[in-house]
């Protein structure tokens, strides 16, 4: 099981106990399927591992649910699972966090702590600014190949796009009263 998938499923179940298919639908809605897809088989294998590790447990179903041909098994996070998810969220993000890691952390915190979300956005913004600061100046056409120039500019624009997204996320969290910090990110 991908580490991210483990914590994504724990976060979704901590938000709301759910059965397998419902978790799959919520997973696909919360995360970019093209970037981080999960198959039904992969999800059920993840649920089996999480249950075996004592991080989730099935919830008792009502008699009406048990009479179905194939009863659905809802799961919830155990105290051990909540502790593991909390430890994951308390560890700092990598210096160059992936989009999947950021979305995972935001999803796990989203319904509980707006201030924690804003701190995560601040950390991500600083990582982006640090990354821009480490990038070399635009190379002159004589000192770098066309491919090197294009690759550097693609990387620079990607980081600038992440900064614009941070502004958008802050706007969504705080409301329209706050003006964006990076509304215009000029190329170097």
Image: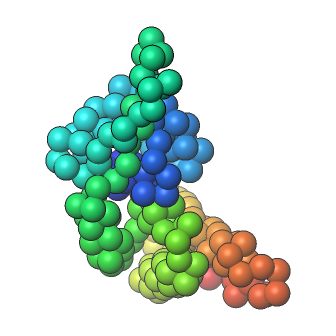
Where does residue 17 sit, x and y in percent of width and height?
Answer: 45, 48
Quick one: quadrant of the C terminus? bottom right
- 53 in relation to 37, above or below: below
Badge count: 0
Q: Position of residue 186 (x, y in %)?
A: 70, 81
Task: Using the rendered image of the protein, determine whether residue 94 is visible from the camera's viewpoint.
Answer: no
Between 162 and 28, the one nearer to me in the picture: 28
Q: Is residue 139 above or below residue 178?
A: above
Q: Residue at x 52, y 71 (%)?
A: 112
Q: Residue at x 44, y 26 (%)?
A: 63
Q: Is residue 74 above or below residue 98?
A: above
Q: Is residue 15 above or below residue 1?
A: below
Q: Please state which of residues 129 and 62 is positioned toward the viewer in this rendering.
A: 62
Please name the colour scheme applied to the rendered image: rainbow
Tell which of 180 and 137 is nearer to you: 180
- Report x, y in % for residue 131: 45, 79
The residue at 49%/57% (across/down) is 15
């Amino acid at each position: 099981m991908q580490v991210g998938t483990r914590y994504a499923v724990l976060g979704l179940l901590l938000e709301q106990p759910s059965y397998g298919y419902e978790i799959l639908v919520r997973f696909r809605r919360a995360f970019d399927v093209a970037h981080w897809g999960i198959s039904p088989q992969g999800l059920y294998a993840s649920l089996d591992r999480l249950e075996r590790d004592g991080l989730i447990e099935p919830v008792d179903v009502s008699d009406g649910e048990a009479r179905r041909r194939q009863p659905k098994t809802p799961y919830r996070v155990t105290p051990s699972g909540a502790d593991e998810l909390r430890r994951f969220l308390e560890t700092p993000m990598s210096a160059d966090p992936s989009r999947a890691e950021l979305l995972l952390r935001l999803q796990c915190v989203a319904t509980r702590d707006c201030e924690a979300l804003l701190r995560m956005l601040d950390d991500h913004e600083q990582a982006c600014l640090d990354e821009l600061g480490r990038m070399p100046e635009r190379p002159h056409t004589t000192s770098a190949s066309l491919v090197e120039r294009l690759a550097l500019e693609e990387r620079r624009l990607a980081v600038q796009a992440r900064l614009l997204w941070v502004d958008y996320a802050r706007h969504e969290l705080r409301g329209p009263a706050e003006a964006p910090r990076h509304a215009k990110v000029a190329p170097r």
